[in-house]
Amino acid sequence: MAFAAGRVVPILRIFDRTRAHEFYVGYLGCTVDWTHRTGEDGPTYTQVSRGELVLHLSEHHGDGSPGVGVWVAATGVRELHAELAAKDYPFLNPGLCSSPGSDDGVSLVLLDPFGNRIVLDKRA
């Protein structure tokens, strides 16, 4: 059988689930699909999604380092930018930029509270 890859779901390291939910759910508009926690006070591992965008947010020490960059092919980038600009979120006010390597594409770069960078990119 030939190799075939499925969906890639990045694991983003977080340090504070309340701040993570404020950003990913309150600001970005994701839904919490599920959360796993080891013990009553243990770190959480959560899946959030918005449409086809699926991200795992982990408080576990071994699940990566903050400051990772994730590139996401997307449509409706300008519409999402307008939606986010209308929200009262004092920690981020992203602008649109040119899509690298494209004359008429557009990117929206989001920096979460833990230094993780999500690049939503619409290539023409």
Image: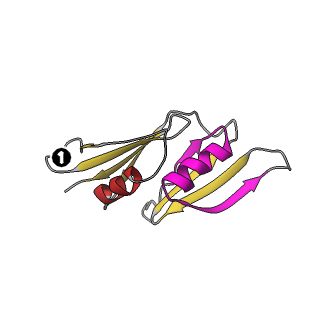
Asked if residue 23 lies left or right of residue 1, the reply is right
Q: Residues within 10 Å of mark 1 (few under 14, many from 20)?
A: few
Say what amino acid the circle numbered 1 marks.
Answer: Ser
Q: Secondary structure at mark 1?
A: loop
Instruction: Quarter of the image for the N terminus: give it.
Output: bottom left
Q: How many marks?
A: 1
Residue 36 lies in the magenta-colored region: yes
**Whether residue 73 can be seen here:** no
Depth order, front residue of 77/93:
93
> For residue 61, which quarter of the picture?
top right
Instruction: Quarter of the image for the C terminus: give it.
Output: bottom left
Q: How is the image coloured?
A: secondary structure
Question: What residue lies at 86% left-to-right and 50% top-to-bottom?
Answer: 40
Depth order, front residue of 91/3:
91
Where residue 70 appears, as percent x and y from the top left, is: 43, 44
Asked if residue 118 lies left or right of residue 66, the reply is left
Question: What residue lies at 62% left-to-right and 43% top-to-bottom?
Answer: 19
Question: What residue lies at 57% left-to-right and 58% top-to-bottom?
Answer: 48
Q: Is residue 66 above or below residue 51?
A: above
Where residue 3 appears, as percent x and y from the top left, is: 44, 60
**Whether residue 2 can be seen here:** yes
Circle 1 is placed at which residue position? Answer: 102
Question: What residue lies at 42% left-to-right and 63% top-to-bottom?
Answer: 2
Asked if residue 119 lies left or right of residue 10, the reply is left
Where residue 92 appears, as percent x and y from the top left, is: 44, 40
Give the residues drawn in magenta, as a range. 9-37
Asked if residue 75 lies left or right of residue 60, the reply is left
Where residue 24 appears, as percent x and y from the top left, is: 54, 51
Residue 107 lies in the magenta-colored region: no
> For residue 94, which quarter of the picture?
top left
Q: Is residue 67 above or below residue 46?
A: above
